[in-house]
Amino acid sequence: MIRLRKLARAASLLTTPLAPEDILSLFNPVFSARQLRGVVTRVVPETADSATIFFRPGRGWQAHLAGQWARIGVELDGVRHWRSYSLSAPAGKDPAITVTDMGAVSGTLVRTTKPGDVLFLAPPQGDFVLPEHPRPLLMLTAGSGITPVMSMIRTLVPHRPDSDVVLIHTARTAADAIFREELAELADQFPNFRVTHWFTGERGRLDFSSAAELEQLCPDWRQRAAYACGPEGFLDDAEALWEAEIAESTPAGAAQAATLTIERFSTSLAGGEGHDGGLVTFEASDREVEADGDTPLLDVGEDAGVLMPSGCRMGICHSCLIPLRAGQIRDLRTGEVHGEPGQLIQTCVSAAAGPVNLDL
């Protein structure tokens, strides 16, 4: 151990002002003692506006569970932006994310990413995962909500031929349905895996106001452990149906065998009141920006080129907390206006309610 420390010190002297790991990163782009990275190995187009990006992570990455997500960092115009993406690869395999072109960061990943590019990474997290004990499953997905469920299907179906899985996926058209061909092949190969595609452009929105349509698609849905992922409205409707059915079919709303596990991608944000918004001053960066009352301060800062801490961008992980120096902000989830000097605020779900000074 002493000899290793001496070698490390000697290496530092030889590479000064760089650290030894900085030299190693010239030969291996994913090597970094400071920031977890991954190198892109393959990019597979899925639809006209989505692609799956496979990457080889560096030291420090922990194997993901099927259904988990990870924060991915991308540098745009010298500013590092972080977004959260579900991992669509099966558990135990090299990770991949499936991204739909929705915004500057996702659009850059879909349109310009190529093998050899380096991504910044944070370890996988999330509890939207397969149940510990095998059960008949019902998967309800819409749009890009298929991505974490695809990781579950790829993990479970080919390796457990006795698994009983029903997938109901909604998309606008067949061309918009991510993984459609692969899902069809899996359904042909494994009889216990059944897939239904619901194309809203032809049939309208899948109606969860009653159990009638779901009953036709999956008659035994009440006996299955259900997982749902998709837009807020889709999930709210599914949640309301499950709650109503459980309350109606069991004494005093007692819990029954069927469960519904939900993964939400975004937080519904309240609109501004018109008089909200104001001049946002980023004191450490010496920048001032006029902001409206609807745009999260995180986006205001990033658009101004300020390096903003961020994580889930949904008000969940608290990675975006920064001190408020002066002014008041409005919580975009509740509409509440508040703020005291020194208070830590979540910039991803807060907008300016008048002039605001931030410690960045």
Image: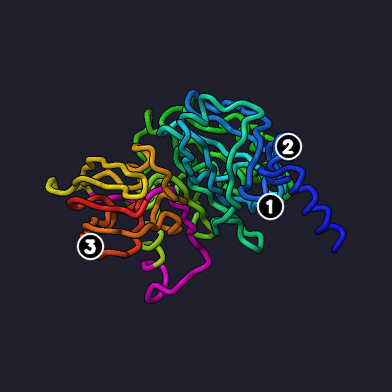
**Residue at mark 2 to residue at mark 3: CA–CA distance:** 47 Å
Q: Earlier in the sequence, mark 1 or mark 3?
A: 1
Which x, y percent locates residue 143? 45, 38
Which x, y percent locates residue 149? 56, 46
* Residue in front for this viewpoint, 303 or 179: 303
Tell me if I can see residue 28 in this picture. yes
Residue bearing the label numbered 3: 338
Q: Secondary structure at mark 3?
A: strand
Disc 3 crowd rating (10 Å Cα; few below 14, some 14-19, many 20+) is some
Q: Which mark identifies residue 214?
A: none
Q: Earlier in the sequence, mark 2 or mark 1?
A: 2
Residue type, numbered disc 2:
Asn
Disc 2 crowd rating (10 Å Cα; few below 14, some 14-19, many 20+) is few
Q: Which quadrant is the N terminus positioned in?
A: bottom right
Viewer-nearest of labels 2 and 1?
2
Q: Secondary structure at mark 1?
A: loop
Q: Which mark identifies residue 28?
A: 2
Q: Is residue 255 shown in magenta?
A: yes
**Residue at mark 1 to residue at mark 3: CA–CA distance:** 39 Å
Residue range highlighted in magenta: 247-270
Residue bearing the label numbered 1: 60
